[in-house]
Amino acid sequence: MKKYVLGRVIRAIIAVFVVTAIAIIMIFTMIPRENIFRDDTAQLQKLNGKPDDITIYKNNKWEQLGYLDFVRQAEMCQTESDDYDACMIVNEHTVVNDNGIETKEYTYSEEGEKVIEAYTQKGYKVQYFVYGGFYATKDYSGLEIVFNFFKNLIKIDTPSAVQDPDNPDLERKIYIGTDYNGVPAIMCSGCEHNYLLYFDGNFPFIHQNFISLNFGQSYPTYQNPSTLDVINSSQGSLDNREQTYPNGKTGNSADNFHTCTYKATASLDHMDANKFDDNYANCKSYYTYPSMVSMSYIFGIIALVLAYAIAIPAGVAMARNKGKWPDKIGIVYVNIMIALPSLAFIYFMKVLGFRIGLPDKFPILGFDNIMSYILPVIILALMSTASLMIWIRRYMVDQTNADYVKFARSKGLSQKEIFRKHILKNAIIPIVNGIPSSIILCISGSVITESVFAIPGMGKMLPDSIKAFNNNMVITLTFIFTALSIFSVLIGDLLMTVVDPRIQLDAKGGNE
């Protein structure tokens, strides 16, 4: 069994990486790179009339996102020239054309031309700025982009991570200490993070910063933060609370001191000195609303519990009364729910709920009001009940003709006892297989429901990122959703062996 599970885990990891690699190649090679600036109009408008600044800005972004390597004249001369000053010389000439219009032309020193030739030989495309100077770019192939992505994916925090020339005496060590609340924690000096392992009251209660995944920065939406920070960070307004600062003082602050990272000495100010006694002063903040992923999970898990609470008794009742009115009513309900378009059902329920006083948008009453959850949860639950009901009914009806059921009847067991103790136990096994997927994939949210009710969850994240050409966010979500889907199937298979020990996954042919 252990060998089988290990094999499944290895195949799952390979599958996740293959799917992600395919997504990377498609995004970076099939979609015009200029599209990423479509929603970045504010910054481009600031640079309007400055063609060289626009060129630098775009190439810096393309390099940051992994499209190419961008090298400017100064770096080219530093790398390839023995005479930096001569390489940097740009000669300006005024040229008058036949119409008497003056234009500027630029020529470069012999040393500069040598550097240009050297970079051309290395496969770079050398181009020239409008107002003098040159630069070089080299596009990465699809395989190079994939390699660079996975090379930088896993980030390990170590005491040598921080390099601050203004703090040469920085002590570098990992040690066991206590946080600002007096709770034991594994801490570090010289790492990017101050806390490598800590405890708090937020799920999953134990948190680590030893190893992190680096999917790059979100662009053009949510500019600058990493994609994982966008997904995991709290939302809403700042949540100021009375806290004990790391330097021992107390006061109101929204800073989450467990998340503090190293701040360069040159960037420290008097506000930092009021809270901190070291350079670990760059902290995330507490906000009033949960993160996008938490928001989707809250709605999803409540709706899932409600769906199973409705569907299992209803499916059992349909099977026990096959051909009778409970079964007929159930089949009518299932047919209606399957045939009715999701969007039409959501809007119908929205209008119905609004007429009885429920809010038709989540932000109207907000996170703290239970009425904000009623309509979305009921809609998500009811949309899942039809398929669950019909499968439970089908599995139970199939089991009614099994030999063990006939034997139970011959022993004098009542129909109710047979269904409850025998048929349901066997019929529920295939349903159990899908429970982990249903629970885990609540994280992904519901696109239509969250859009209709303006819920700030994960549902709209993927389609919105695709529309905005937010490459790193699309890749991040592809990686996360693929991993969750594949591993939830494995967990479902393992859960079936717990419910029914007769199922042997590692038996001959079990991994087919």
Image (cartoon, helix red, strand yellow):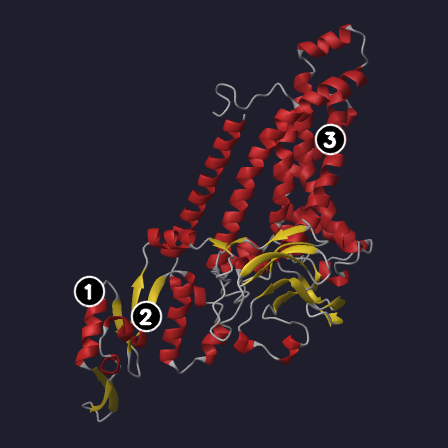
Q: Is residue 99 above or below residue 244?
A: below
Total marks in image: 3
Q: Residue at x 38, y 51 (%)?
A: 146
**Image location of residue 323, percent across then percent down:** 73, 21
Q: Residue furthest bottom?
A: 100
Residue at label 2? 71
Helix, strand or loop under label 2: strand
Q: Nearer the viewer, residue 204 or 224?
A: 204
Q: Residue at x 39, y 60 (%)?
A: 66
Task: Left or right? Give the position of 149 relative to 243.
Answer: left
Residue type, mark 1 in image: Gln
Q: Nearer the viewer, mark 1 or mark 3?
A: 1
Residue type, mark 2 in image: Val
Place residue 75 in its image quadrant. bottom left
Q: Is residue 38 visible?
A: yes
Q: Is residue 63 above or below residue 444?
A: below
Task: Point out which mark residue 208 bears.
Answer: none
Marks 1 and 2, Cα distance to the nearest angstrom?
A: 15 Å
Q: Is residue 128 above or below residue 70?
A: below
